[in-house]
Amino acid sequence: MKILGLIAGMGELPKLVAADAKARGYRVVAVALEPVADKDLGSYVDEIKWVNVGKLGAIIDSLKKSKVKEAVMAGKVPKSLLYKSKIIPDLRAVKLLFTLKDKSDDSILLGIAKELEKDGITLLNTTDFSSGLMTPEGLLTEESLSENEWKDIAFGWKIAKEIGRLDIGQTVIVKDQAVMAIEAIEGTDEAILRGGKLAGKGAVVVKVSKPKQDMRFDVPVVGMKTLISMIEVSARVLAVEAGRSILLQREKIIREADEAGISIVGYKE
């Protein structure tokens, strides 16, 4: 039987990836990253080990002991943990961080991928086990957009792609072709709350993949928390890159967006 290592961060995505892999005949061995992975992840996988997110050596050793040759990363690990003392780095993690040119997402994740490769573990695309979750193109909700909202999407798209190119974030909040907030280390939901409060009602949220998105990690993901944040600040539109982002709990999000008067668009330039 094929074995898939699952390096699991927060949220629902690791569970969905595990279910997809098991349906394909994989035995799924999870390394659940503390303190962020969901506590009930164990019921979705064949084997689970809990390791502090900063202990890179222990993560790799756990995978090797379970004879993992292929692995996938799924679920967000907030980089803000680096600055909140919730990461307890081991020697291998310290060495990796010391050799990086910067602490951008791409630098850290590419470094981790190289460390896995040193021990014979190939990191696969997250989307290999979540293709059914990709955002479709077009208007997904009932309420159509105004001409000005379409202009906001086109305007925000260029800004979001640029901050993605610079590896700052993937999300921008705009209103009337002005930037209210860009996502940085705080993450999408906090950026929405910040930008939405500045915009008042009617903000447009645009979330994209990076121009050179590595599908092995940090693929844009939209879930219920994103919608809840939008509702809290009376945002109006969520535009997500079609075909290159993951939309979790699609039916539920669309239903609740309709109830809240929020339009969701799978957008392609």
Image: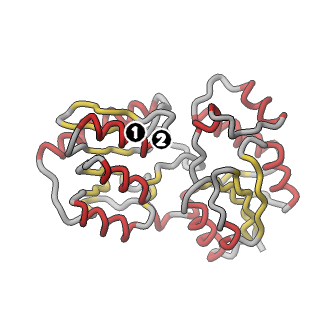
Q: Position of residue 242 (x, y in %)?
A: 36, 54
Query: Does residue 125 appear in the picture of this structure?
Result: no
Question: Helix, strand, or loop for circle 2?
Answer: loop
| Left or right: residue 138 compared with residue 41 | left
Other-residue count near label 2 (Cα within 10 Å), few / some / many at <14 / 14–19 / ≥20? some
Residue 206's quadrant in the figure?
top left
Distance, label 2 to label 1, CA atoms, is: 6 Å
Query: Does residue 95 appear in the picture of this structure?
Result: yes
Circle number at residue 191: 1
Other-residue count near label 1 (Cα within 10 Å), few / some / many at <14 / 14–19 / ≥20? many
Question: Helix, strand, or loop for circle 1?
Answer: helix
- Locate the N terminus and report the quarter of the image it occupies: bottom right
Q: Position of residue 19 (x, y in %)?
A: 61, 72
Residue 54's quadrant in the figure?
top right
Residue shown at 35% from the left, 51% from the top: 240
Residue shown at 69% from the left, 54% from the top: 7
Q: Amino acid at mark 1?
A: Ala
Q: Is residue 229 above or below residue 84?
A: below
Callout 2 touching callout 1 (CB < 8 Å): yes
Residue closer to the observer: 214 or 189: 189
The residue wearing badge 2 is 187
Residue shown at 65% from the left, 67% from the top: 40
Q: Position of residue 259 (x, y in %)?
A: 24, 66
Residue shown at 70% from the left, 68% from the top: 42
Residue 16's quadrant in the figure?
bottom right
Q: Amino acid at mark 2?
A: Gly
- Locate the C terminus and report the quarter of the image it occupies: top left
